[in-house]
Image: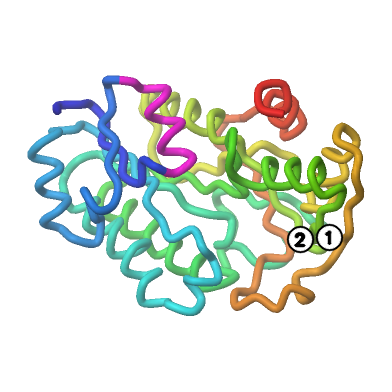
Amino acid sequence: MKAEYLITGASGQLGAALLNLLGSDAAGTDLPEVDITDPGSISAAIDRIDPQWIINCAAVVDVDLCQRKPDLAYKVHRDGVMNLARTGRKLLTISTDHVFTGFKGQKEPFLEGDKTSPANVYGESKLLGEVEALDADPGNIVIRTSWMFSSRAGMIPFFWKSLSEDAEVVAVCDQVACLTFAPDLARAVIDIISHGGKGLYHITCGPGLTPAQIAGRLAEFTGGSVREISWSDLDLDAPRPVYSEMATSRGIQLPTVWDAIERWRKNNA
């Protein structure tokens, strides 16, 4: 199958949204068919599909697993991106807000040019992947995003189900970041490629909120209550960024988080 776009990690939220948007212009691949940590596997896919662009959505999304198994995180997020970048095809790869830790000024959103300070192994491995992509070709694209959700996966469906069925949800109150609606991000990915974009972008549905604030908004529709906790209460392996709200200086702006949640609610609740 020949296609303009080869999408790795196509069974995930963004990969599925991209396939829905691109149709026959894209070929979706995932494990075990294509393993980005195996150059031979990538070469076989390139020979079969002959894409102009590779859109890399493959990742180890379990942040705590990355902290416990750093070799796995670096193999996928750094070495996997390096393998894709060495194919000679244009590459767009997805990164994360976890490249930031703490606050910028008085809780100002982080922009593309701000200094990074990874919060954990996941963030460090993703940052190294960014370097691999852009060092290989400055015309490649890196998109940092955060807290992705879609029709049936992510924070919004989880909170909605818990509030609707259990009448209570537990939500963290001491972390601020941005939600991102996968279909909105997919459209932005294609717009950036279509308009000749290159380099680093921050793409999210702002503004930054805590999970408890998000759950509280959903509870206005579902009823139920929100029990607030801190990250330390959960005793997880990986530290999280206290504040990682991102904004962009690149002129690509997604709809607000409230707009995205309302569209999700009308189509999925």
Q: Is residue 255 above or below residue 206?
A: above
Q: Is residue 245 above or below residue 153?
A: below
- The residue lying at 35 percent from left, 46 percent from top is 9
**Residue 40 visible somewhere in the drawing:** yes
Q: Is residue 146 left or right of residue 86?
A: right
> Foreground residue, 170 or 68?
170
Q: Is residue 104 left or right of residue 44?
A: right
Q: Quadrant of residue 7?
A: top left
Horizontal and vertical percent for residue 113? 55, 52
- The residue lying at 61 percent from left, 62 percent from top is 100
Q: The C terminus is located in which quarter?
A: top right
- The residue lying at 41 percent from left, 24 percent from top is 20
Q: Which residue is mark 1?
A: 173
Q: Which mark is residue 199?
A: none
Q: Secondary structure at mark 1?
A: loop
Q: Which residue is mark 2?
A: 175
Horizontal and vertical percent for residue 171? 80, 57
Q: Which amino acid type is marked by label 2? A: Gln
Q: Which residues are magenta?
A: 12-23
Q: Which amino acid type is marked by label 1? A: Cys
Q: The N terminus is located in which quarter?
A: top left
Horizontal and vertical percent for residue 184? 56, 29
**Residue 139 visible somewhere in the drawing:** no
What distance separates the C-alpha of mark 1 from that of mark 2?
Answer: 6 Å
Disc 1 + disc 2, Cβ < 8 Å: yes
Q: Quadrant of residue 175?
A: bottom right
Q: Is residue 151 left or right of residue 206?
A: left
